[in-house]
Image (cartoon, coloured by chain):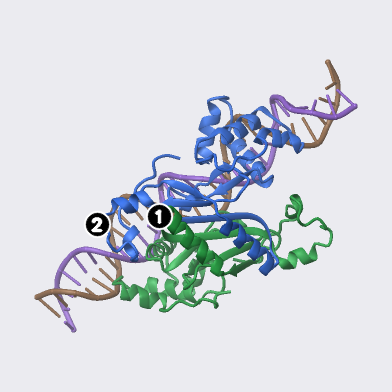
Chain colours: A green, B blue, C purple, D brown
Amino acid sequence: MKSPNPQRRSLVEELSRRGVRLTGQRKILAETIQSAEGHLDAASLLELARKRDKGINRATVYRTLELLKELRLIDELDLMHLNGEKHFYEAKTTVDHVHLACFQCGRIEEYTSPLFERLKAEIERAKQFHIRLVRLEIGGRCSRCCAKAQSCAECAEEECCKAAPVKPPAA
Amino acid sequence: MKSPNPQRRSLVEELSRRGVRLTGQRKILAETIQSAEGHLDAASLLELARKRDKGINRATVYRTLELLKELRLIDELDLMHLNGEKHFYEAKTTVDHVHLACFQCGRIEEYTSPLFERLKAEIERAKQFHIRLVRLEIGGRCSRCCAKAQSCAECAEEECCKAAPVKPPAA
DNA sequence: TTTCCAGTTGCGAATACGTCGCAACTAAGT
DNA sequence: ACTTAGTTGCGACGTATTCGCAACTGGAAA
């Protein structure tokens, strides 16, 4: 889920390169985010980080996420609020990608496309808007769940995906 | 900000058409959302609605928003969390649009494009994903603020938009 | 290598936003 | 008018995040 667009330097390298004070907590947190499978929320990140340093505090996690976000080393996601209002984080990749969230099984897929890049370029030109951050999230029903839904012949119809929303597998 | 894509029926019409019980509160809330300039958050909606019915409760606002969201009569936005974690709402329009949020002045612009429609179609085809909901938000610097920023000749550079974030004008 | 201090952390309380259970109320079908 | 399933107001609750402040520490300077 993480591999298609690796970033050039590690988060830790990038932090020191930018003259940010490298505390033990920041190293652990950056490395944890970097090596995470999938998308982490603040609570999961804290939990993982505490396996390396018992003492890491929740506030530090939030402050570090804020820092990384401002430096644009990570992206913040909502993942369509499938599971509460918390945010998810991932190390920035070289190319922006769309997040597809299945309302039925909770699976998250990623998707990149030249069309997406073209759309961004068009917007910058047409609106004279200097883009700093992009977030495209799409909710619906994934291929697996569509396949499973024999009951729903009229998949193109309105209410098709409303039934049976299921808690997603994990964070 | 609201006019480019009007929807066919009013929210109230749509509710009754779908057999939803039309309470006084729902009428007021639906009409308030519909006639709102710009984007409302739950608190502003409550405040506006109370001008028509003192007794309307916060919980009813949230429940009604949830209802309208599930019926896909309104869209929920984050507007890049320019101002806290609250959500904003708008009556659905006939065509999906992008929201452009200026980190500097807080202005929200909307943008529609055939390219956006093509991207969605591509995703549905390529990933066999049945799209129910789309949210594309872009943060950066609007044309006005770019024009004003004489100081920043290297607008294409990294940190350009980080300075002087300003509280947005209103809800 | 020690000193020093601006920047960072842990802590616990506080805030923001949204949700819930339950008794009273009401839309709308008969 | 009667009836009742669905809705509302209320206040307490929950979850995610932020804050103030004293103690701590990375890393530059001596």
**Callout 1 secondary element:** loop
B37 w.r.t. C26: above or below: below
In front: B158, or B95?
A: B95
Same chain shared by disc 1 and disc 2: no
**Mark closer to the observer (1, 2):** 1
Query: Which image quadrant: the C terminus of chain B?
Result: top left
Q: Residues within 10 Å of mark 2 (few under 14, many from 20)?
A: few
User: Which residue does the image show at 41% across and 55% down from the upper left?
Assistant: A129
Pinpoint the chain carrying mark 1.
A
Label 2 amino acid? Ser
Residue position marked by numbered label 2 in the rendering:
B151
In front: B147, or B105?
A: B147
Question: Which quadrant holds residue D7?
Answer: top right
Label 1 amino acid? Gln
**Callout 2 secondary element:** loop
Rendered location of residue A43, percent (x, y): 51, 63
Question: Does residue C13 appear to the left or right of D26 in the view shown?
Answer: right
B44 w.r.t. A102: above or below: above
Distance in Å between CA atoms under marks 1 and 2:
17 Å
In front: A48, or B119?
A: B119
Question: Which quadrant holds residue B14?
Answer: top right
User: Which residue does the image show at 38% across and 76% down from the upper left?
Assistant: A12
Rendered location of residue B49, percent (x, y): 55, 30
Residue position marked by numbered label 1 in the rendering:
A128
Question: Which quadrant holds residue C26?
Answer: top right
Residue B161: mark in rendering: none
Pinpoint the chain carrying mark 2.
B
User: Which residue does the image show at 75% across and 36% down from the upper left?
Assistant: B17
Question: Does residue B170 appear to the left or right of B43 in the view shown?
Answer: left
Rendered location of residue B116, percent (x, y): 57, 58
Question: Does residue A74 appear to the left or right of B31 in the view shown?
Answer: left
